[in-house]
Amino acid sequence: MSLATLLLLADGRLPSGGHAHSGGLEAQVAAGRVKEISGLDGFLRGKLATGGLVSAAFAAAACADVTRFSELDLGLDARTPSPGLRRASRAQGRALLRAGRAMWTLPAAVGREPHQPVALGALAAAAGLSPVEVAVAAAHGSITGPASAAVRLLGLDPYAVHALLARLAPECDRVAAVAAERSGDPVDELPAAGAPLLDIGAEHHATWEVRLFAS
């Protein structure tokens, strides 16, 4: 394991376009469902238990077996009912591959515009990381993006937001461990936890003329 490589992959400053996405938070803020730090806590816990688990499992599976990229990508399509969220995931996957290709030699089988978790798994495999390591990066990324967006959307104290992320770190590790244990499962048996309000919110969000984030 290279801890420095894992930190590089999980670094929010990696030019992968993540800063332009709120992970569905912007729509929930506009709907009045998230207003303060306690509401953000609930949002992030829900995000980690659903999309975070799915992303971590698919990233781990892609890292474990580079021949599965295509079927994993289709599996994520099936788990993402919202066209807006599918577009956002593929946009982030495309940006992540661009950054990855500047650092490592990526497998050709990954394609040109995979879902973000598949792209993340491809980068991890190319960098010599393990499925559990990339699962940690995926689970962590599923909450740090929305947390950063919350500071801008709600004007929250960044110290309080990072204290919240610190409290969620053990849950990130637990979700990543569960995801990595499933990395060899058939695609149809990988986690498929959904968050309908995020799907609905994403479709409303896509119609807004003015928005701060792409998703």
Image (cartoon, helix red, strand yellow):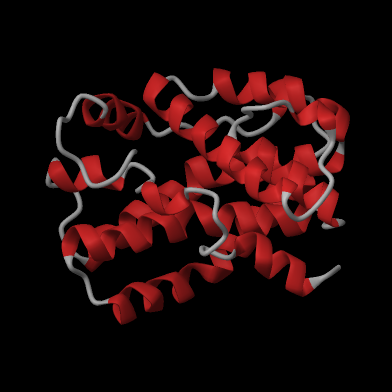
Q: Nearer the viewer, residue 15 or 68?
A: 15
Q: Nearer the viewer, residue 35 or 175?
A: 35
Q: Is residue 82 visible?
A: no
Indicate the position of residue 157 as horizontal and vertical percent values.
Answer: 24, 77
Indicate the position of residue 195 as horizontal and vertical percent values.
Answer: 40, 34
Residue that appears at 29% across and 45% down: 213
Q: Is residue 124 visible?
A: yes
* Above or below, 84 relative to 45: above
Q: Is residue 21 left or right of residue 64?
A: left
Q: Nearer the viewer, residue 25 or 178?
A: 25
Q: Residue furthest front?
A: 102
Number of labels in the image equals 0
Residue that appears at 77% across and 51% down: 124
Question: Which quadrant of the rendered structure holds the C terminus?
Answer: top left
Indicate the position of residue 63 as horizontal and vertical percent values.
Answer: 80, 43
* Above or below, 31 relative to 187: below
Residue that appears at 67% across and 45% down: 120
Q: Is residue 64 left or right of residue 44?
A: right
Indicate the position of residue 144 as horizontal and vertical percent values.
Answer: 45, 61
Residue that appears at 42% across and 56% down: 145
Q: Is residue 72 left or right of residue 46?
A: right
Question: Which quadrant of the rendered structure holds the N terminus?
Answer: bottom right
Q: Is residue 145 left or right of residue 175?
A: left
